[in-house]
Every structure is written in C-alpha cells, then in structure tokens.
Amino acid sequence: METFDLLMQGFSTAATPLNLLYAFIGVLLGTAVGVLPGIGPAMAVALLLPVTYGLEPTSAFIMFAGIYYGGMYGGSTTSILLNTPGESATVITAIEGHRMAKAGRAAQALATAAIGSFVAGTIGTALLVTFTPMVVDFAVSLGAPSYLAIMVLALLAVTAVLGSSKLRGFASLGLGLAIGLVGLDKVTGQQRLVFGQPLLVDGLDIVVVAVAIFAVGEALWIAAHLRRKPLSTIPVGRPWMGKQDWKRSWKPWLRGTAYGYPFGALPAGGAEVPTFLSYVTEKKLSKHPEEFGHGAIEGVAGPEAANNAAAAGTLTPMLALGLPTNATAAVMLAAFVQYGIQPGPLLFDNEPELVWALIASLFIGNTLLLLINLPLAPVWAKLLQLPRPYLYAGILFFATLGAYAVNLQAFDLVILLVLGLLGFAMRRYGLPVLPLIIGVILGPRAEEQLRKALQLSGGDVSGLWSEPIAVGVYIVAALVLAWPLLAFVLRKTRGPRPETAAADQPAAVPGTDLDAPAGGQNLRPVASPQDEHVDERIKERP
Amino acid sequence: MSVVVGYIPTPEGEAALERAIAEARNRQDRLVVINSSRGDAYVDQRFVQADGAEALARRLEAAGVDHVLLQPLRGHDAADEVLDAAESHGAGLIVIGLRRRTPVGKLIMGSTAQRILLQAECPVLAVKAAAG
C-alpha cells in the first residue's frame, strides 16, 4: 500500500500542467528520433542534457522518460513502413511488419505495434513499480564486494552477450574504461591519463563524451555515407484493427511482455533477445504458421510488446541499483550525476519525489504516445523525407552548443571533436558504441566499490569475494564468458545442430538464421536491397 | 537527336511522360527518361523503386519507342540532371511537367521547371496534369 501511496504522489507531481508539457515534448521528440534511423533516444537525451540544466530535475527526467518510451514507438513505424529498423530493438518487427505493409495491411501492423507497445509499456511499468522497491530492499543489504561483482557482471554481459563480435565489444569496453579513468584518483589524489594538461584533471565530462560519441560520431558517419538510394515508404491511412486482428494480437502482446520485462531487468539487458524469443514463440504457437514470412500479425504484436516491456525492465536496475544496461539508461544515469543526485539503492530514500514522479510519468507518457502514434503514424513517416544534411547540421549545432555550455570551456570542444572522431572510427570498424558508454559511466563507479572493498579488507584481495552474493555473481559472470566455449563443446558432442548456432545470435539479421530455431520450415525471406540496408544499420548500432 | 523527359510518379510527371512518348514516336527519336533523387533523405517518394522502374520499362517497351531510363543519384538537383542528360544525349526536345505553385512556395523551394526553361539549349515542352 505504501508503494501505491508513493505512486499516487508521483502522479500528483507529474500531472502538473508544466510537467505534462515536458512529458508531451518528450514523447514528441522521442517518437521523432525513434522514427529516424541512426538517431536514437540516447543521442536525444545526451543532446538535451545541457539544455535541461536550468530545469527542475523532476521536469527534466519526465521529459527523458518520454523520449525513452517514444523511441520504441517511433522505431516500429520505420520498421513497418520502410523495412529499415529505426532502432535495434525493432529489427525483428521489420520482418513480419514490412511484409504486412507490402500486403496492404500496414494500418493493422501499425495499430498492433502501437497498442501492443501501450499494453506492454503499461504492464511493464506496473511490474517496475512492484519489483523495484523489492530490489532496493535487497540492494541496501549488499556490501561493496557484491556491488563490484554485479557491476563487473553488467559490464561483461553487455559486452559479451550483445553484438556479434566479442573482440570488438571488449575493445570498445576498454576504450570506455580508459576514458572513465582520466582525471584525479579520488582516493590518493594522483593524476591519471592527464598528459600534463591541467584542464583534464577534473576528468572528462560525461555529457561531452556522450554527445561526442552519439551525435558527432553519427553525424560524421552519415556525412561519409550521404548518398544512398532513397527508399519509398508504403502509403498508409489511419491505423486500425479488425476484430480478427484483436483476437490474434492480445495473446502475443501478453507473451511478449512476459519475455520483455525480465530480460530488460537482467544486467545483460537489451531488447534484442526478448524480441527475438517472442518472434520465435509466436511462430511456434501461431494458428497460422503459414502466414509467417508473409506478414503474420502475431510476429509484429509479440516483438513490439517485448521491446517496450524490456524498456520498462531496463529501468529496474537503473533506478534500484544505479546499473544502466542500455545506452539511454546510461545517459539518464549520467544525468542523475549531473544534477548531483547519487544513483544507487538510496535513490528511493533520498529522492522519492523525483523517482515516483519519473515512474508516474512513464504511465502518462505511454498513454500520450498511444494517442499521438495511433492516428499520426503516417505523418511521422514523413519525417523520413527530411534531407539529412539539414538534420545533421542541426544535430552538430546542438552538440557543439551543448558541449560548450557544460563548462563554458573551449577545451571541451577539442575533446568533443577528438571523441567524435573516435565515434566515427568505431562505426567505421564496426565497434559497438554501447560498451564504451557503459564503461565510461560504470567504470568509475565500479572502481569506487573496488577501492571500498579493498579498504574494508585492509588491502587483502580475498576481500573481493568475502560475500556469498559476490561469489555467486562472479560464477554467473564466468558462465557468461565461457558460454560460447561451452556451446561449442556441447554442439561438438551432440553433433552439428544449426539450432544452437542461431540461438547464440539473437540479434541476427532478417534473412539469415532467424528461421532455424523454429525447426524445419524454410521461410527465409527473399534477399532484397532493403535487407542490405538492414544489415548496415545493425552493424552501426549494435 | 532524342527526347528527354523528367519523370516523377505524380500526375504532372505522368502527363509529361505520356506526351514525351507521343513526341518520341512522332519524331522517331530515342526517349531518355530521367528520374533522379538527391539521395540524401531516407525516403524519396518521387524516386521510382525497382518494381516501379520495371513497370515503367514495360510501358515504354509497349509504346514501341527506343528508350533509356536513367536514375542518377549524385546529389544534384533534378533540374541539373535533366539539363545534363539533355546535353549528353543531344536532346532535340525536353518535356517536363508543371504544377501550380504559390509564390512563397517558389521562393523557398525554387522551381525546377523554371530553371530548366531558362537554361535549356533546346526547345522545352511544359505539360500540365489533366484537370480532375
């Protein structure tokens, strides 16, 4: 009951006209960046961070929450109408969704995506309300060694589980941790990686790093690949669903939610795995398996629900433990730090008003999103006709302004450009960006716990595994690392089975291994120029 | 000599194409169809996709004129592409579609048709979409 009271208080904070306005701006921006491939909610939040300095933290986070959920809605529109996923989480939606659109059922696909996202987002947020306080209760009992272990697990899992190349993932993580090291050592006051540059002593501002990697890196990358064959969106009227569509959609929505929330809440997080699992499940359970590959509505309803529930799930470790598992959560965590709010299990005690207003605004934002997306999806698709030079010029302008506004220091612009070039080089060589940003943000926090744990044990290394939970988490981390090897050995002993191979790579590209786990049917989509397009985007934003 | 036509899948574009086919047949000339895009947006509804291009080619085939379909993606304006093609194919006639524009719209967007009319080295036939 106490939780309910707090939530209602949150609603009263979030429902003031001003905060409703910020929620509205948030969902509009979120949908827009979701629709546009290459620009995600993480970039939008990073760009807005400097702009929101003057705001109340509560208002700023209400806006960020809107952007976060909005990105998920917008991404599905692009997937369905263009076959180019706006976000990595909507890659799976594109498979059936685009085929539905081609078969003239775009309106139903958009409707089931939007309503499914709403249902899953609402249930997911309700689960967030239920479980997060429990996680917090559990988390306050944890000591530094356990925290360190959980952070190490999150870092490893985000790097090793998501993305196709583990080597590239770890390279990116290493870069992130190195960037996080720059500055004064908090305990001994030693200067690290400063290179005699006094302006570096304070460390690199996370806002500058995030803006450089997401906005400048992406803008340079797009500038280098500006000319490409334009596609045409499939014309569509107002999204709607018939009785039959409702009947076929509601179960996939619920099952997708059931997949999405727990996966989002795990430290390995991400929406890619649950969307894939949901797709495979729906394909198995469908009464119309023959329609899969030709536009089955279940294949849109399930994954879309899963990705929104995962978005809600991701906020559980973010709010309860200060543990971000996707890029947007990482940037939001950076925002907490910017506002001088200490993330972690004490957040609920120290800032109850902020946290509960944030959660309440998720419910509000989700409803707003349904209202602006259901009738307006075709209008959003028009954003794709925007010439990219204008778009990215605007982004670069905001990035520069924002980076300068943080400290009013011209040196930050140099850092912005250098890291922007790094972001470009990472995209060029297929390094995922997520491990870097998580490394920058979690690295210093993990170090702090490491130092604490070592201080408690008087410098004895065995202090790092003095708590049972820490030992358990390290075992899980070891399993995560050893899993590819184990899977390889298992496959060898059980004979060649293509199923395992495909299950290892959930974020597989449409047109590659997606059909394998469902067994014999071969519904491999015909290769098309659009499929190459999809490939390219996935490589860029793993 | 050849007939160059700027084509986009709109009523004006269709009208221009219809007329250009008739002109090419009359003159026994080759028909050069230009459908260009600057290629800097994710979506350009005026750029004919693969299946549309096939249908277009079949239509030209059926009309019985010697034809080339060009879809340049070089970041140039449609006007430049049409003028370019007119020069390189030695055009005897350029056919374009015209549509009504408000003065403000013309001020902001510029006018492809106007540039072609003013800069072309050969006669230009401007066609309007059938009323209705």
Image (tube, coloured by chain):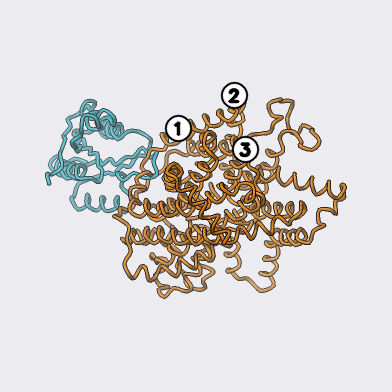
Residue that carries the numbered disc 1 in the rendered image: A393
Q: CA distance from mark 2 to mark 3?
A: 16 Å
Q: Earlier in the sequence, mark 1 or mark 3?
A: 3
**Which element carries disc 1, helix, strand or loop?**
helix
> Type of residue at label 3?
Ile
Is residue A322 depicted above or below B88 in this figure? below
| Residue A434 x/y as whole percent | 60, 47
Closer to us: mark 1 or mark 2? 2
> Type of residue at label 2?
Ala
In the rendered structure, the answer to whether residue B90 lies left or right of residue A17 reads left
Asked if labels 3 and 2 touch by Cβ distance under 8 angstroms, the answer is no
Callouts 1 and 2 on one subunit? yes
Q: Earlier in the sequence, mark 2 or mark 3?
A: 3
| Residue A365 x/y as whole percent | 45, 51
Looking at the colours in the rendered structure, which chain would you say is drawn in orange? Answer: A
| Residue A89 x/y as whole percent | 50, 55
Residue at the image position 47 percent from the left and 69 percent from the top: A282
Q: Please tell me the colour of chain B.
A: cyan
Residue that carries the numbered disc 3 in the rendered image: A206
Asked if labels 3 and 1 touch by Cβ distance under 8 angstroms, the answer is no
Q: Nearer the viewer, residue A53 or A289?
A: A53
Residue at the image position 79 percent from the left and 46 percent from the top: A452
Q: Residue furthest bottom?
A: A287
